[in-house]
Amino acid sequence: MKPEDHRKILAESRNYVASNLSGLLYSIYSFIALFLSFYFLAKSGWTYYILGQVFLAIFLTHAFVLLHEAGHGTLFRFKWLNHFFGHLFSLFSFVPYLSWREIHRKHHYYAGIKDLDPTTNYAAKLKLEDLHFFHRKISQFCWRFYLPFNSVVYRLMTYWNPIKISKEFPQRKTKRAIFANITLLLLVYLSILYFFSFKKIVIMLFPATFLSFSLMDIILLSQHGHIPYVDSTTRTKKFSFFEQTAFTRSLSVPVFIEKHILFYFNRHELHHAFPHVPFYHYHKISYDFPQTYPLWSWAKEARRMDINVFLLEDYSKTKKRF
């Protein structure tokens, strides 16, 4: 994107504001998928079970995207609605809302600076030879066969990790709020395990969770993975939103999937260029970002690479942009 194009669209985008009605409608739309999943799962037969799992997977994918929007304060106009629905959707995303919000804000501030961005600084000094043999083999096996191991590890080590959170947010008030949120969410999950049998939970949730996590595994790792970053030894000043698109990748999918399943979460270059714009206005911004690739062909090519090389190195070394 040229600077003049960004300035022009940025000026237009000031009109693309968050709407309580739009946020509510998309939330209801997502819960319809959840209710449909319950409806089909309550019936007997494999056809109904499969339909139930598909709709549940769609809802879980929606929940993660809507958590993302609430964390930005762009799902609703009112702040309290973003907080309420952010906590609600975090329950179904398996990510604490406050740790997500604070870490993701810091990510947008330092995107492009590898050792300052909290979503990439784990890899700033880590080298391939530092990884344990079994970790490399397990992560590579899961990556090759579309098992969402890396997505699960990412969520646990980034948003549930008390050591990381303490380092990223030394301020007592912020840290206490995040830890309280984590504790409360854990208590909710433990209560569910207490009142419902583990077997029943697995039968009801595992296939859908697996499907959703497998899809998000591709999208999340594509967004910034294997792209050359700088570090704080060469730059400490944040990149502008326009400059951050150089460190971001998008994936193209059929319009129906983009609009109704992913809620435009695949358009990550657009998101970094205009983080203040709610996703339900994305269709109003027409621009062909340069690092946009078809999802399935990108995933197929990326899976041929060792996931550890993909995460710890970049295309300036491997010459593979996919």
Image (cartoon, rainbow, N blue to C red):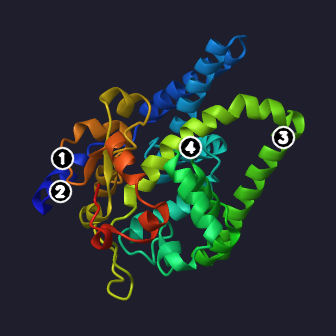
Nearer mark to the viewer, of 1 and 4: 4
Mark 3 or mark 2, earlier in chain: 2
Q: Residues within 10 Å of mark 1 (few under 14, many from 20)?
A: few
User: Residue at 72% across / 64% down in the picture?
Assistant: 179
Residue linked to disc 4? 213
Amino acid tagged 4: Phe
Above or below: residue 138 compared with residue 163: above
Residue 193: mark: 3
Residue linked to disc 1? 288
Residue 6: mark: 2
Mark 4 or mark 3, earlier in chain: 3
C-alpha gap between disc 3 and disc 2: 49 Å
C-alpha gap between disc 2 and disc 4: 33 Å
Q: Is residue 81 visible?
A: no
Q: SS at mark 3? A: helix
Amino acid tagged 2: His
User: Is 26 or 199 nearer to us in this picture?
Assistant: 199
Nearer mark to the viewer, of 3 and 2: 3
C-alpha gap between disc 2 and disc 1: 12 Å
Q: Residues within 10 Å of mark 3 (few under 14, many from 20)?
A: some
Q: Position of residue 237 (x, y in %)?
A: 33, 80
Mark 1 or mark 4, earlier in chain: 4
